[in-house]
Image (cartoon, grey):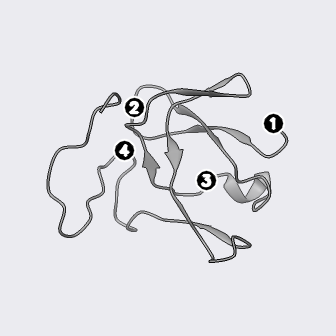
Amino acid sequence: ADKLYCEHIDIGEEEPRNIASGLRAHYNLEDLEGQRVLVLANLKTRKLVGFPSHGMVLCAASEDGSKVEFIEPPADAEIGERVMVDGFDGEPATENQ
């Protein structure tokens, strides 16, 4: 529990999404406020220390894991917009796939 942040992230839905992330060792709370992030939103809900997490914040880590950085969406991406990867065209998997 002391390694997790329980976040409320706006991904363009009616309500912000509750997501738990293991970023506490890498970021101060102030660093997270207003940060634009990519969210894997089609993951099955998991309870982490009693907090229902409805997704995952996408980050990259250095080879030794000492540095973790957010994968940021394109500057012109709208909140909630689906971000595509070159070479992948298809529909997102549902939560249970």
Amino acid type of the residue tagged 1 in the rendering: Ala
Q: Is residue 34 above or below residue 52?
A: below
Which residue corresponds to mark 4? Answer: 80
Q: Residue at x 74, y 28 (%)?
A: 49
Horizontally, residue 1 falls left or right of residue 22, namely right
Q: Residue at x 68, y 54 (%)?
A: 32
First in residue order: circle 3 vs circle 2: 2
Which residue corresponds to mark 1? Answer: 1
Q: Residues within 10 Å of mark 4 (few under 14, many from 20)?
A: few
Q: Residue at x 80, y 58 (%)?
A: 25
First in residue order: circle 4 vs circle 1: 1
Q: Nearer the viewer, mark 1 or mark 2?
A: 1
Q: CA distance from mark 3 to mark 4?
A: 14 Å
Q: Are marks 4 and 2 in contact (CB under 8 Å)?
A: yes
First in residue order: circle 3 vs circle 4: 3
Q: CA distance from mark 1 to mark 2?
A: 27 Å
Q: Is residue 20 above or below residue 47?
A: below
Horizontally, residue 77 falls left or right of residue 38, namely left
